[in-house]
Image (spheres, rainbow, N blue to C red):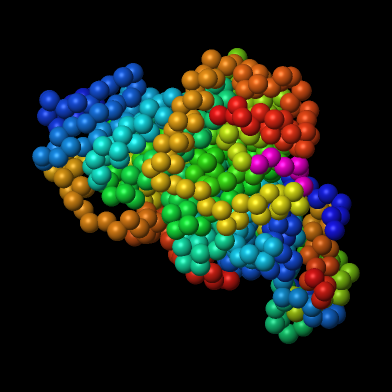
Amino acid sequence: MRVARHSFYEATARKRIDGLLDAGSFREFCGPAARIVSPHLPALGMPVAFDDGVVVGEGTIDGRPVLVAAQEGGFMGGAVGEVHGAKITGLLERALDVKPDAAILLLDTGGVRLHEANAGLVAMGEIQRAALSARHAGVPVIVAIGGKNGCYGGMSIVARSCDWIVASEEGRLSISGPEVIETVEGIEEFDAQDRALVWRTMGAKHRRLIGEIDALVADDVEAFRTAILGFVGRPRPLDLDALEAEHEMLSRRLERFWDCADGRDVWARLGVNDPASVPALDAAGFNGLVDALSGGRP
Amino acid sequence: MEHLEFDYDGTGEKPARALALAGVVGSGNLEVLIEAADLGGRCAAVVDTSVRGFGETWRQVLADFFARHGLSDVRVSINDGGATPAVVSLRLDQAAAEIKDAQA
Amino acid sequence: MSGAIERVLADLFGDGHGVVRDGGTLTGVARFDGRTVTVVGTADRAVIGADVALKLARAVLDAMRDEPGRPILVIVDNAGHRLSRRDELMANNGCIAHLTRCLDAARRRGHRVIGLVHDLAVSGGFMATGLSTDLCFALPGSEVRVMAPAAMARVTKIPLERLEELSAANPVLGPGVENFIRVGGLEGVWDGDLKARFREALSRPLDGADMRRSLGESRGGRTVAARIAAKVRAGASS
């Protein structure tokens, strides 16, 4: 029975895990009682969190064993520091040992935690390598994006190194934050206050239309669960042919759209009749549009 | 940062569960970890807060909390990002409700 | 700065190499100790845009197609990823991820992938290149950083003076090759005989395990990551 819609966007990392996994199945690794906190924040006068902003563990989804990590976007913007990164890396390396049906990463992050910048950057390189190792071992790695911070910085590279990405309409996936582009390159390059522009450039609908993500869902934990479940046990090939196919897809995208100034121009060229209407579509209406376009999608 | 430690008389039952966590550390917010602990019936609290100089307020808020909930043999650990006393009490109540709930 | 990249390439491969510079990118092949080496990378503090990432990825794919096991030298010299609306519209993160997946695939297919930082590597630009190699070194005088100290002070709201003081004491915080060596993000500095250094890196026995955490631990720069990752891998509750 489906009860009232439960916002993924508003939920904490722990509530997201509770909603995704089978009731009572989650077992946390190195949980808050272990007090594995950042060794770097106190010196900067910053409060720590008992889980360093990420919850990792194992459980089942529809009876199938999975590993799961959920970033807590409320703590330091979900940013990756030394401990936070090591927990995700260790979880993905565990996939090599226990071969779950999937490893699931609920990402909600601005990227590297500047307060422990060098450790965070290298940690993201390690997370990426561990994710690819899990994939080479045949374990699909599934990313979900739908929190307040979106998925930015180095973690946006990590996300696109995984098998599947599920995002809500509220999800954003990009390497640079709008504010960073505006600060460095000027407001003419990017007006970070223009939220509609942010969504047309970095939002989940644009990402779905150009083939960067695999499923767009409503902002509902149950909708995420259903979409994620559809990818459990389904690893994507990662061989040379798959890399060549990806290269072809990306090269074709740049050829077709490099002169586009706005997401609406890209969508029009993809065959969307009324690009201005796209932002207002709900998930079902949008997915209908994607299905109708699927012949022409890059 | 300021580190504070408090100790109170226990006034009630031991908790039903081993631990509960409420809240997230952020600006104006805090996390409360409450754990069953063998403290000879007493209660303890440890607070790490980003705002210095409010020791007496913390002592009072925590004293009210333990009196209100009738707990014994529990340790409360708090990481605080500058929450108001109202938010602190809310998180404490959420954590207490969870650790006392044998069904959860 | 240790001199133009052309001089570095000439020191490594002599004058007859086939590495071509096109704007900010470097691609091509060279001969070293009687074998062919693919060189990919950037120069002059290039910014890694979607087009640059795909161009480098193509060269890595070609190396894998052309000759199984051929070594790949990644020249790392960038001011980060390109900050532009167009690159974001095209999903630069996806293009950079593709480049890093190609480098990763090369490593796993038995190509020795060596990174060499020349002059500068910044954040996403370092992740796009140096962090996807088997071993990444830096030339003397180069710098690796996440963010320039003044910007970092602004974003973290920690006064610059205090930040610099803290950076001196903690290698996870401040910029610099030495700090990245200590956290395990760089293997070391290549000074003196570049040929000898490259030869050693090509022949060093590696088993494919990610050694960066244990390096960070033994060098005292990243002291808890290895232990915590191991605990989580073991499924420890505490």
Residue A232 on image: x %, y %: 60, 56
Give me the residue at 17% from left, 48% from top. Answer: C200
Residue drawn where x is 52% and y is 60% of the image: A91
Residue A25 vertical position relative to residue C156 in the rendered view, above or below = below
Taking the magenta stretch, the answer to whether it contains residue A298 is: no
The picture quadrant where one finds residue A35 is bottom right
Magenta span contains residue A219: yes
Please determine whether, in this image, residue C21 is positioned above or below residue A40: above
* Span highlighted in magenta in the image: A215-220
The C terminus of chain B is located in which quarter?
bottom right
Q: Residue B83, position in %: x, y?
A: 76, 51
- The image quarter containing residue C164 is top left
Q: At which x and y percent is residue A83?
A: 52, 56
Q: Is residue B9 toward the left or the right of residue A164 in the image?
A: right
Depth check, front residue: A214 or A96: A214
Residue found farthest to the right: B68
Q: Quadrant of residue B100?
A: bottom right
Residue A189, percent across and down? 58, 17
Tell me which residue sits at (24%, 40%) in the image: C67
The answer to which of B85 and C87 lies nearer the viewer is C87
Q: Looking at the image, which is closer to me, C65 or A151? A: C65
